[in-house]
Image: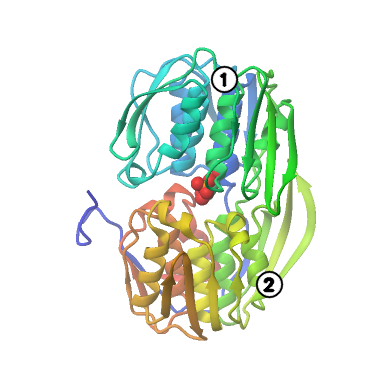
Amino acid sequence: MRPAPEDPALSPLSARASPPLKGRVRVPGDKSISHRALIFAALAVGETRISGLLEGEDVMRTANAVRALGAGVERVGEGRWRVHGVGIAGFAAPRTPLDLGNSGTGCRLLLGAVAGAPIAATFDGDASLRQRPMRRVLDPLERMGAQVLSVGEGGRLPLTLRGALDPIPIVYEPPVASAQLKSAVLLAGLAAPGETVVIEPAATRDHTERMLRHFGAEVRVEPMGAHGRRITLKGQPELVPQPIAVPADPSSAAFPLVAALIVPGSELVLEAVMMNPLRTGLVATLLDMGAQIELLEPRSEGGEEVAELRVRASALRGVEVPPQRAPSMIDEYPVLAVAAAFGEGTTRMRGLAELRVKESDRLAATAAGLIANGVEVLIEGDDLIVHGKGLVPGGGAIATHMDHRIAMAFLVMGLAARKPVAVDDTAFIATSFPDFLGLMRRLGAEFG
Ligand code: S3P
């Protein structure tokens, strides 16, 4: 059960109107790539060196889990890790349940990896993760030969999965656009003979495909329909360790980026932010809204596009965000809604059904937070509509529901609202952006 708001175990905080944010910062490593780096390294034979790993709680859960599955995992410096992989299907049965904490990505990707190994493992998580749907991943994994030995009501954690002795390659069309689901099937497909195919209804982040290739697997990607892709993996490759440099996380950069847009007089440079085109929906939308964001020194680092982002405080206007853009900015809607509240005019964000099954129901939590701070907002079907008035009264109290991005989005709102904005718990920020408060304070943000 969630603790009551007055619970002393919570870490509440408020953010207040701040002087212009100034400086040059690098946000931590990308969460999606960090999870994948550890998991692929564990499935390769030999030693993989990782730099720039996000040392947030979610990724540390994945590190502990791959260690419990038999891989050697060692921290050798800040963000620098060495992993001794055991090879595809080489996992050992863990002696205790794998506790993935708050992390949907760690849990779903590891379900896929375990489905291709001849072992049984129990998966569990915190109260937020125990609410999230796992059936969507278990269905295709069962088709591939894995067995669900036990599972919570409604297909939820805790659950025990027995991997397939002889995994079966499948052709799978996920019912939702989800990179986690795609990745789980591809990870199980590594252990299957022949070709495993995932046909996505809309292209989702492709870090799994990129990393598979980086480690020497054969992956074909073909466009399908208007927005989709057909991904074909040739099974049973030998994954060869390769160095991995994790670029800065655009989903974390989103918070100082929006803060700089809404706090008058701000000017920031965000260094080496990953600009993978399947992750840049927020930047595209903010540019449509009139944001002053310059992409400087675009280049490739460690197999991903990166650039410096120079951001200046801007007058924003309302826009319509098309549903096809959702996969490329799925984690950025709470902070986009905050930006929209400071803009002039209506922003309609369409096709947000998946937001209901994130670390919290983000559609409800975002709308409730905006309303609590005097912003006019509406949920219509799966659309979120924000009526921006150029200023936000603030003064609201935010229930974060164990959700790091809800906490950070509303702290950002408080930096430019008329009255301070209070969030009930900052503890979960450590899952993805442990030094968020320190970094924001160094730029001039005032919390207390
Ligand atoms: C992620 C995929 C997205 C995203 C999550 C990270 C990934 O989830 O919300 O934060 O690393 O694959 P879905 O695949 O469920 O949309």
Between 41 and 19, the one lying in front of the other is 41
The residue located at (62%, 55%) in the rendering is 328
Q: What SS does tag 1 mark?
A: loop
Left or right of 326: which side holds 162? left
Q: In the figure, residue 223 lies in which quadrant?
A: top right
Q: In the figure, residue 421 lies in which quadrant?
A: bottom left
First in sequence, mark 2 or 1: give its number. 1
Specify whether residue 441 is in view.
no
- x and y, in percent, of residue 302 in the image: 73, 41
- x and y, in percent, of residue 427 in the image: 36, 53
Kindly identify which residue carries mark 1. Answer: 168
Between 382 and 114, the one lying in front of the other is 382
Instruction: State the CA–CA distance, disc 2 to disc 1.
Output: 45 Å
Q: What SS does tag 2 mark?
A: helix
Quarter of the picture containing the C terminus is: bottom left
| Mark 2 nearby-residue class (10 Å; few <14, some 14–19, many ≥20) | some
The residue located at (62%, 83%) in the rendering is 315
| Mark 1 nearby-residue class (10 Å; few <14, some 14–19, many ≥20) | many
Left or right of 364: which side holds 229? right
Between 25 and 371, the one lying in front of the other is 371
Q: Is mark 1 within 8 Å of ligand 1?
A: no
The residue located at (60%, 28%) in the rendering is 40
- x and y, in percent, of residue 357 in the image: 41, 51
Specify whether residue 392 is in view.
yes
- x and y, in percent, of residue 268 in the image: 64, 69
Left or right of 43: which side holds 129? left
What amino acid type is highlighted by mark number 2?
Leu
The residue located at (67%, 78%) in the rendering is 290
Kindly identify which residue carries mark 2. Answer: 287
Q: How is the image coloured?
A: rainbow
Q: Is residue 191 above or below residue 107?
A: above
Marks 2 and 1 in Cβ contact (< 8 Å): no
